[in-house]
Amino acid sequence: MWRYPPVPRYRVVAPASLPPDQPGEPRQTWNAAQIEAVTGGTWHVAPPPGWFIRSLTRGEGHTPLVPPPTMFVASDYWTLATHERFGDNESERNWDWSESVARMQPTLAGAVLRKPVPGLAPDFPVLLVDDPIQALVELGIAARERLQGKVIGITGSAGKTSVCHMLDHAFAPTHTRFATIDNYNSRVGMLSMLANTPAQTDLVILEVAVSAINAVDYQNIKRVRPDLAVLTNITASHLGEGETVMDVARRKANIFEGMQPGAWAVICTDTDHFDYLVERARARELRVLTYGSAASADFRLDAHDPATGHVRASRPHSDGQRFEYTLGAKGRHMAVNSLVCFAVAHALSLDSGRVPEQLASFAAVKGRGQELSFTLGHRRFRVIDESYNANPLSMTAALASLADRPDEQGRKLLVLGDMKELGDDTQRHHDALVEPIVQCHPARVFLLGECMTRLHERLAAALPQGATVQAFDTLEALERALLEQVATDDTVLFKSSNGTGLWQIVRNMTERQEEEKEKEQQQQARLARERAAAAAAAAAMPKPPALPPMPQPPTVVIRRTGSPAESAQPTPSWVLYDLTHDRLLTHQPSEHSFVPASLSKLVTAALVEQKLRDDRLDRHAEAVQVPVDPVPARDDPSAALYAADAPPLPVHRLLEAALVVSSNKAALTLASWHSGDFDSFVAAMNRQAQAWGMHDTHFACPAGLVRTARTTAVDMLTMARHVLHDFPALLEMAGKDRLDGVSAEAPSTNLLLGRVPGVDGLKTGSLPGLGAHLIATAQRDQRRLVSVVLGAPDRQTCARLSALLLQRGFETPAAPGLQ
């Protein structure tokens, strides 16, 4: 069993003994002579004359985040663990960053190594030391000793990273600063951050973990020696068996042990054990400032408008100074955090004149309330990413912030994972979340983890009718369900402890969005190349019916109630609609109604989707046994799916078959699964049509095979609008250009997919002798159009007419007066 060597002890180099800076080089941090003097190392490959660096990093991921030139400190895992005093090292492989230096050298100005490594350029500067991590820490200590500015240490159970970034942003126009990168706040981390600071830096803003504070004899925090400590709050977090929140308060308050008498402690009045924290600070002869919502606060939050971000604050117990500003980050907890900026400015005599305008442009950081806009397929929605960590305080703050958002901005979806390391009261802390969750008025709640799953029944009973609660065993199942159910204008909150892994879903969505953007760009480039070649072929095609000029939208769309379809093929009818701007572009009515044919499958699919939601079923997991036909349909490309020996098919697979290749078998099977019999499902189809306002429509078959059905172009537009808004997963399925997983060729029946820019669905329909139909939708430049063509002579003419309608629509200004 591996055991730690003794606790490392670090050397302190007096600033007066350091060699001077390189002349004429602003913002240099270290030169070759200084690094050698502090670390006691030897230059294996000496740098050239005039060489200096601005930054040092220990991890490859930090290298792009710091200013070049950069020196890399390469160590193995066990050396790092010795200094960090990591626990539970039995399963760790002793990786060594030295193995990566040769690959990284184009981005580096040099490296600190234990021994030479192969693959480096002959002139690549290399400093050899016995212990690279000790060298890095001692450079941090030396940087602190020579620093002419102030060090701010920030600790607490929640909000450390947000306050760190907020202070950095607030004083950016008026002071030189260095702030913790990527919340590297450990024993080694906070001193390695100090190692990156030139002597002339005004403010060093460090996030400080509880482990960094509580080293043996507090030696690490004593070396940091904060001039001001911010203690944001105390709550249940990182609790061991038998521990309480008071134990957290004691460990956090130990930051004061690293400070000199006369330094400042800035403490939040709203925290548990506030009096104890103040007592500890005063016992160290620190000067205390308080902030928060309490009447006793030195810097008090008087009002916060969650809709506008407007903040009113004051100093009621001194000069009565008032502050009014707008805060860019959402949430009352962020408004409380912002008071730290004014308290720090007062304590350290900083210029605060630009702080209000800087706070207006401050945005929450990754994993801690960052707001992201996503466009996946046709859906545009917002994500509030709180996935980095969670405890009872930060969880309730995030939920309260979401609850304050107006409901009319769209649906609210909650994706919640377990809060970890809460000690003996873990489940009690989770149970207390039911009421804050209900106050958010969520339309969907997705739960992951043992403790959150136990809330399922209580939440389902407490939420209003129509809201759904789903619990998942795996991250993958949750991600799949979320992506199927999220819709345009939704706001999705992710909140959990880091170990639950919800951050992976946010990462995957980000990568997927980038992939879709790249594919769209590639498709546009390909289409641009093909347009010239297609022009000649298009000239030889039969001309589609002439379109009337695009009118301005009428004040009222007059629906014509058609007579039942006749045996003779009626004149085509069409309608074109700008869904983004809610504007009718053109409408060619008909004196006749039309048999909807396979367009009926859209309402069939919508009813199936609604049942999945209502019954909380996973379309990928819910399987249906397909009846075997004595004579399989020869013209169904999906027929192989329904073989006699085929296993039950997932509902998702049947929906794809119905929408992509217009499989009648799939539609009829889904109808039977939904309602049990044909007539009951047809009745449900017509109830849905009436609910959607399709008063000139009558459905007669889930697959559209019965000729007594009737509809109009306007009613089909109404259906399409509801499908796009309420069932976004159907568009994603209908946008596939082929049905995957069948041996035969199975291209989509929609001839526009992959041929007309921006087209991504919806559905075709035809019956012999009754013409061809197509509902198509396309999106270009954040503008979505829907076209409906009924009764064209054949599929090709129907597709050409639809393409022409869409093209004319995109050429029409988005709104009257636009150019």
Image (cartoon, grey):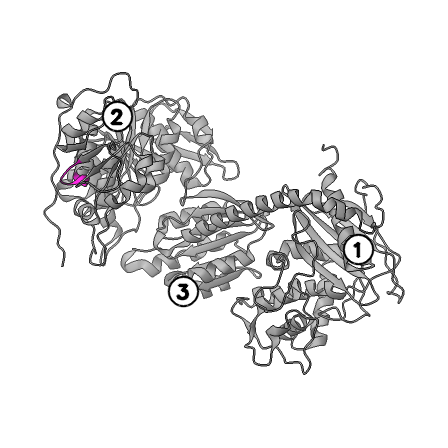
Query: What is the residue that sits farthest to the bottom in this orientation?
Result: 630
Q: Is residue 132 magenta?
A: yes
Q: What residue lies at 70% left-to-right and 69% top-to-bottom?
A: 684
Mark 1 or 2, nearer chain start: 2
Residue identified by numbered label 2: 52
| Marks 1,2: beta carbons within 8 A | no
Mark 2 or 3, nearer chain start: 2
Residue identified by numbered label 3: 454
Residue 229 appearing in the image: no
User: Which quadrant is home to the C terminus?
Assistant: top right
Which range is magenta? 128-134
Position of residue 651 in the picture relative to residue 349 (left or right): right
User: Identity of the amino acid at label 1?
Assistant: Thr
Q: Residues within 10 Å of mark 1 (few under 14, many from 20)?
A: some
Q: Is residue 27 magenta?
A: no
Q: What residue lies at 18% left-to-right and 49% top-to-bottom?
A: 78
Position of residue 619 in the picture relative to residue 700 (left or right): left
User: Identity of the amino acid at label 2?
Assistant: Phe
Between 117 and 338, the one lying in front of the other is: 117
User: Identity of the amino acid at label 3?
Assistant: Arg
